């Protein structure tokens, strides 16, 4: 990979991430590679303004932080065909990041120059929110993109009422979920909120959506995995107050009202994540992050 300009996005209010961004800038400068540093509390207008003033887009975006910083950066870059390289600095689990040793021993530059990596294409979710009334054309209210998930929960903040949410898949009404809410995740997002809500872990190379009810009132309401070529429609069907709140990747979006509905499908352009050939495998990542036992025979041999 030829590097002439790199954008570095580091986690806000994290001294370790800021320090790592300064280190990264110096390492790139030593190789005559220009870079620009910004904190992750930017808004999309700032990013667009920055790109508009450039003669050419950055060759690479380096993200320093946890999965939350990666998600925000990936969503902000949805309209730009720029690969993302992320390191877990000051974050929590870090399913989307590379090991930080590659950064601090400066080997990441050589790995990039020698092309000792793969581009990991991660499918995104897209949500169009429409308002519809009988005898009128539907009206597009808002559009959102997410790398991990969209989810629907109560609009109430002081109490936690039961939500009743209708789901339609490829023009078929499939179910009405009663419970705390509903998650629609990508395979990448299957290790995020969906996993915490009891959903299955799906390998990121599998092109799928996970539909996962949050604390359903019926034992028959189970998670389901569907092809990501599907079109999913979500409506609130509460008898009294037909409103639910839409969230994406952990951030509030808007209230879905009685005559509104959400249409969710796959984004045409996937997110490009750089994965080093020397990085640990997906399964080793799961073993480490989730404290799985791994190969017990190796541990037994060490104890003997």
Image: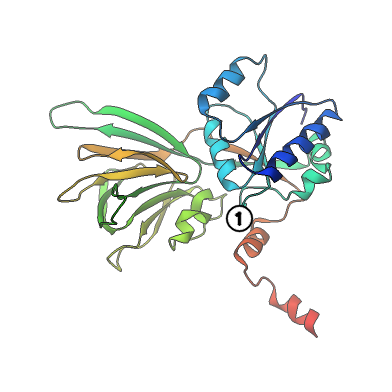
Image height of 88 relative to 82, above or below: below
> Quick one: SS at disc 1?
loop
- Furthest-right residue in this view: 30
Find residue 163 and report its image quarter. bottom left
Q: Position of residue 127 (x, y in %)?
A: 38, 37
* Residue drawn at 74 percent across, 42 percent down: 117
Q: Is residue 270 visible?
A: no
Q: Is residue 149 visible?
A: yes
Q: Nearer the viewer, residue 122 or 257?
A: 257
Image height of 103 relative to 287, above or below: above
Q: Position of residue 37 (x, y in %)?
A: 69, 30
Image height of 104 relative to 130, above or below: below
Considering the image in quadrants, where does the C terminus appear?
Answer: bottom right
Q: Position of residue 164 (x, y in %)?
A: 24, 54
Considering the image in quadrants, where does the N terminus appear?
Answer: top right
Circle 1 sits on which residue? 93
Find residue 27 and report its image quarter. top right
| Type of colouring | rainbow
Q: Position of residue 269 (x, y in %)?
A: 52, 33
Q: Give the mark count.
A: 1
Going by the image, does 30 lie left or right of 15? right
Q: Nearer the viewer, residue 106 or 91?
A: 91
């Amino acid at each position: 990979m030829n590097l002439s300009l790199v954008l570095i996005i580091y986690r806000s209010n994290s001294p370790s991430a800021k320090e790592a961004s300064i280190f990264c800038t110096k390492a790139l400068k030593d190789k005559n590679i220009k870079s620009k540093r910004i904190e992750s509390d930017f808004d999309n207008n700032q990013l667009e303004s920055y790109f508009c003033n450039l003669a050419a887009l950055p060759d690479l975006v380096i993200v320093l932080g946890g999965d939350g910083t990666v998600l925000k950066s990936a969503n902000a870059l949805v309209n730009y065909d720029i690969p993302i390289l992320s390191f877990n600095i000051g974050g929590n689990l870090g399913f989307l990041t590379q090991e930080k040793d590659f950064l601090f021993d400066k080997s990441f530059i050589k790995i990039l120059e020698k092309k000792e990596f793969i581009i990991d294409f991660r499918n995104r979710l897209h949500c169009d929110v429409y308002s519809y009334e009988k005898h009128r054309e539907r009206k597009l209210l808002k559009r959102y993109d997410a790398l991990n998930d969209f989810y629907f929960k109560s609009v109430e903040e002081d109490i936690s009422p039961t939500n009743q949410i209708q789901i339609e898949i490829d023009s078929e009404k499939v179910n009405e979920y009663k419970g705390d809410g509903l998650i629609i995740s990508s395979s990448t997002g299957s290790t995020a909120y969906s996993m915490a809500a009891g959903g299955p872990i799906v390998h990121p190379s599998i092109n799928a959506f996970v539909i996962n009810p949050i604390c359903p009132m019926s034992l028959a309401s189970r998670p389901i995995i569907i092809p990501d070529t599907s079109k999913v429609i979500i409506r609130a069907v509460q008898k009294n107050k037909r409103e639910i709140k839409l969230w994406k990747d952990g951030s509030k979006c808007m209230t879905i009202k009685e005559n509104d509905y959400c249409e969710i499908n796959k984004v045409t352009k996937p997110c490009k994540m750089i994965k080093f050939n020397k990085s640990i495998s997906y399964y080793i990542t799961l073993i480490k992050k989730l404290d799985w036992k791994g190969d017990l025979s190796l541990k037994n041999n060490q104890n003997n």
